[in-house]
Image (cartoon, rainbow, N blue to C red):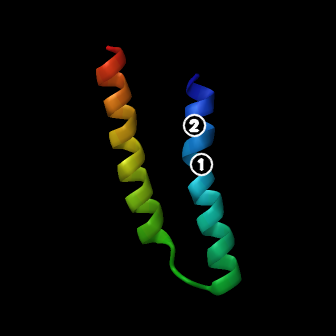
Amino acid sequence: MLAIIAFLSDIPMYIAEIISKLTGADMSGFITKFSDIFAKIIEAFETILG
């Protein structure tokens, strides 16, 4: 279960890295925003399950 969560959390980083290499744009804001949202989703699931 944790491996799946870890894999899913890395997907946006890979997408942002591809976009950054193709366009040269700084995608750090996107990664930060996604990680904040992902953390809130995980906390919500922990609250529901715990």
Residue positioned 54% across, 45% down in the render: 9
Disc 2 versus disc 1: distance between alpha carbons?
A: 6 Å
Type of the residue with mark 1: Asp
* Residue bearing mark 2: 6
Q: In the image, is 17 to the left or to the right of 46?
A: right
Q: Residue furthest top?
A: 50
| Residue 22: % across, % down | 70, 81
Q: In the image, is 47 to the left or to the right of 10?
A: left
Quarter of the rendering containing residue 44: top left
In the picture shown, does residue 40 fall above or below 21?
above
Q: Nearer the viewer, residue 20 or 48?
A: 48
* Residue bearing mark 1: 10
Instruction: Report crowding for label 2: few under 14, some 14 to 19, many 20 or more residues within 10 A (C-alpha).
Output: few
Quarter of the rendering containing residue 43: top left
| Residue 50: % across, % down | 32, 14
- Badge 2 marks a residue whose secondary structure is helix
Residue positioned 38% across, 60% down in the render: 33
| Residue 1: % across, % down | 58, 22
Type of the residue with mark 2: Ala
- Badge 1 marks a residue whose secondary structure is helix
User: Do residues under tags 2 and 1 come within 8 Å of each other at their CB atoms?
Assistant: yes
| Residue 49: % across, % down | 36, 16
Q: Residue furthest bottom?
A: 24
Instruction: Report crowding for label 1: few under 14, some 14 to 19, many 20 or more residues within 10 A (C-alpha).
Output: few
Quarter of the rendering containing residue 4: top right
